[in-house]
Image (spheres, rainbow, N blue to C red):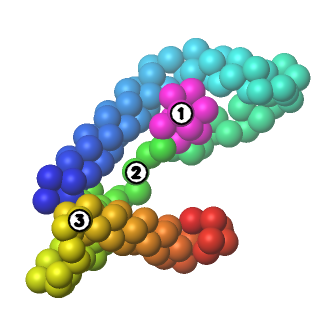
Amino acid sequence: LSMGVGDALSTKAANQYALEERAREMWEMENNPEGEIQEMIEIFEEKGLSKEDATTAILAMSKNKEFFVDLMMAFELELEVPSEDDNPYFDGLVTFCSFVCFGFVPLMGYVVLYSIDLGDDKVNILFIIACCLTGLMLFVLGALKTMFTIQKWYAG
């Protein structure tokens, strides 16, 4: 439960921070557009563009304020503006469900095998089984993650 709540709260805080920074950048763009344009030209020059190319590109992009502010967020602040449908509580629910589902399997080793006579070293054997099941579940989780990425299933 704590991991799900932690994920939800941290995502909400990060989104709120990014939106506040975006509002600040929008204010700066409305009140000091020349300064913001100059900042972006300098950033593009640092990325390897000539002053003329950077100026041409930035002047063209600065005509659309919304786009330009999002560009400043990415290049100046290295922040991603959260989408309108981003729901931190859904992220927290996914994290909670993942911990429940994938954490349940290693614990089942103790529950299922506890009543079986494994000799004098029962505790260590159960621990080793739980560790192996944990490794297996981490592999399965990584493989499932690749369904949403371009990685190979064995590299997840």
Camera-side residue of 49 and 126: 126
Residue at the spot 20% in from the left edge and 48% down from the top edge? 6
- What amino acid does circle 2 point to? Pro
Mark 3 lies on residue: 121
Q: Position of residue 129 (x, y in %)?
A: 33, 70
| Disc nearer the start of the sequence (3/1) | 1
* Circle on res. 82: 2
Any part of residue 12 in sight: no
Between the residue at mark 3 and the residue at mark 2, the CA separation in whole angstroms equals 52 Å
Label 1 neighbour load within 10 Å: few <14, some 14-19, many 20+? few
Mark 1 lies on residue: 78
Magenta highlight range: 69-79
Proximity of marks 3 and 2: CB atoms separated by less than 8 Å: no
SS class, disc 1 = loop
Specify whether 77 is left or right of 91: right
Residue at the spot 13% in from the left edge and 59% down from the top edge? 1
Specify whether 63 is left or right of 45: left
Specify whether 127 is left or right of 41: left
Camera-side residue of 110 and 71: 110
- What amino acid does circle 3 point to? Asp
